[in-house]
């Protein structure tokens, strides 16, 4: 016999479930590429892309937290926490977590960026329920024990040391500092030896509770998946952990930061005994919501996005001054970066920088010819599609889109938008971005006389 209070509780539970909202965001042909979103009463968003033609699935959870959300004393906490969520929950040990996915031939990992963190597992479609249970358990039931914090500290310090040993990687952290200074965007994602050593389990636990609320999370799943089944399994996992107790919560809005770029024309040099000098010459770029980003993508491709690009041809093919030379863009909520990287012999660094600066100035003043722009548009369209040929890439696309833009764009819409870029738009963004005074970051064994000449590059 069911009591009156039990019936009332059941009605309340049913009413709470009824407010979950499901939308079809992108309707693919025959169900292929269909993207759906469900928002649960607790503010948790679940987006899926269904591809019946594949036999795998990638499941990920995106957190609206990155190194940009850290105070100076907490620098490295987001990345530290990423490590600790693999160390054990109330239901699983660290070995249980890794062995569960290994036992089905899957792969599991995570990454931390300036403005978000992602945890994911890629498995056969038949093993998706296991991946959902394991990853959701990690995100909702992490213990963050004192002993795990102490053990993982050593691993993170080794990761910092490994990065320091790779100047081609480290120079990008230096460039961020050159452009943003001692601000959240200018500090390294990994933190420093001093900040990592100072972090305690208690401080990391508070950081975890503040930033891993369901309203700050986006669940993304792509592959041979059934949206409704994914929603039921995710909901069950979060409810089992007591993580969906609120019924009136709404998801956090896409990030809106405050522009924090430093004055142009800065030069930072780290002297190091390396075989090559590693340089990044660059300037402020565009925010990721700026409509000019499509034209900047075409410009970036033409300048340094492939073997036919201007920088590759001028620096490597014609003169053999560098093995690796390329340009890139980074877009944040409110600002961005445009950079040119090259690795070369220390004796050639000034020649390489002069060529790069001359090319940037030339394109800023005179633009690119139509044939180069057309080639870059074709290259960018092709690389966009080829870069989405696995379920992991698709999961990244829909998860990041939901978290950073709050909307989804189909691949066809992306290709159409790229194709709509006009030569005049590319030339205009070249004037706006490349016409700015650049800054420079260098790591290498430069002598005093060489170092003193670096300021000439950004004059």
Image: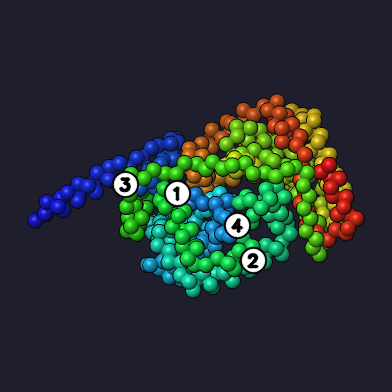
Q: Which mark's residue is nearer the viewer, 4 or 1?
A: 4
Q: CA distance from mark 4 to mark 2?
A: 13 Å
Q: Residue at x 54, y 69 (%)?
A: 152
Could you say whether the residue bearing mark 1 is in a helix, strand or loop?
Answer: helix
Q: CA distance from mark 4 to mark 3?
A: 35 Å
Q: Pointer 4: residues within 10 angstroms few (<14), some, or many (20+)? A: few
Looking at the figure, which quarter contains the N terminus? bottom left
Q: Pick whichever of labels 4 and 3 is earlier in the sequence.
A: 4
Image x and y of residue 14, in percent:
23, 46
Q: CA–CA distance between discs 3 and 2?
A: 42 Å
Q: Which mark is first along the chain, 2 or 4?
A: 4
Which SS class for mark 2?
Answer: helix
x and y percentages locating residue 412 in the rendered image: 54, 34
- Mark 1 = which residue? 216
Q: Please name the residue shown 63% across and 69% down the image.
A: 158
Determine crowd level at label 3: few under 14, some 14-19, many 20+ residues with C-alpha closer than 10 A.
some
Question: Residue 72 bears which disc, if any?
Answer: 4
User: Element type at marker 4?
Assistant: helix
The mark closer to the camera, 4 or 2, is 4
Looking at the image, which residue sits at the far left? 1
Q: Is residue 406 above or below residue 371?
A: below
Q: Which mark is residue 247?
A: 3
- Return the disc, 4 or 1, that comes first in the chain's sequence: 4
What colouring method underlies this structural image?
rainbow
In the picture, which quadrant includes the C terminus?
top right
* Residue at 85%, 58% in the rendered image: 446
Residue 199 in the image: above or below residue 278: below
> What residue did someone put label 2 on?
193
Helix, strand or loop under label 3? loop
């Amino acid at each position: 016999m069911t009591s009156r209070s039990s019936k009332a509780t059941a009605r309340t539970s049913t009413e709470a479930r009824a407010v979950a909202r499901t939308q079809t965001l992108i309707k693919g042909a025959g169900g292929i590429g269909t993207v759906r979103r469900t928002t649960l009463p607790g503010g948790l968003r679940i987006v899926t892309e269904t591809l019946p033609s594949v036999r795998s699935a990638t499941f990920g959870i995106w957190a609206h937290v990155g190194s940009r959300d850290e105070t100076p004393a907490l620098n490295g906490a987001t990345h530290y926490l990423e490590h600790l969520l693999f160390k054990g929950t109330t239901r699983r040990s660290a070995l249980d977590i890794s062995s569960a996915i290994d036992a089905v031939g899957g792969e599991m990992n995570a990454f931390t960026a300036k403005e978000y963190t992602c945890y994911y597992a890629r498995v056969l479609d038949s093993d998706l329920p296991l991946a959902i249970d394991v990853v959701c358990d990690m995100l909702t039931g992490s213990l963050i024990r004192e002993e795990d914090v102490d053990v993982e500290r050593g691993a993170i310090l080794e990761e910092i040391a490994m990065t320091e040993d790779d100047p081609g990687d480290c120079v990008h952290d230096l460039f961020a500092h050159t452009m943003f200074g001692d601000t959240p965007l200018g500090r390294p994602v990994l933190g420093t030896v001093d900040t990592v050593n100072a972090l305690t389990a208690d401080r990391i636990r508070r950081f975890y509770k503040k930033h891993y609320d369901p309203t700050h999370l986006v669940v993304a799943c792509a592959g041979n998946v059934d949206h409704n089944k994914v929603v039921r399994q995710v909901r069950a996992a979060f409810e089992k952990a007591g993580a969906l107790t609120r019924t009136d919560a709404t998801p956090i809005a896409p990030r809106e930061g405050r522009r924090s770029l430093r004055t142009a024309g800065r030069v930072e040099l780290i002297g190091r005994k390396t075989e090559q000098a590693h340089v990044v010459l660059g300037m402020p770029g565009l925010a990721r919501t700026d409509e000019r980003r499509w034209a900047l993508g075409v410009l970036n491709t033409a300048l340094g996005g492939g073997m036919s690009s201007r920088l590759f041809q001028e620096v490597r093919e014609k003169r053999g001054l560098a093995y690796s030379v390329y340009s890139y863009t980074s877009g944040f909520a409110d600002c961005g970066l445009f950079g040119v990287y090259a690795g070369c012999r220390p004796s050639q660094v000034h020649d390489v920088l002069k060529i790069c600066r001359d090319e940037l100035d030339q394109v800023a003043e005179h633009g690119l010819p139509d044939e180069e722009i057309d080639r870059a548009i074709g290259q960018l369209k092709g690389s966009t599609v080829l870069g989405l040929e696995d379920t992991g890439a698709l999961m990244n696309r829909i998860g990041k889109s939901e978290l950073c833009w709050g909307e989804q764009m189909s691949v066809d819409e992306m290709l159409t938008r790229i194709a709509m870029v006009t030569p005049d738009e590319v030339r205009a963004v070249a004037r706006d971005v490349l016409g700015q005074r650049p800054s420079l970051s260098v790591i290498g064994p430069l002598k005093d006389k060489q170092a003193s000449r670096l300021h000439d590059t950004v004059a």
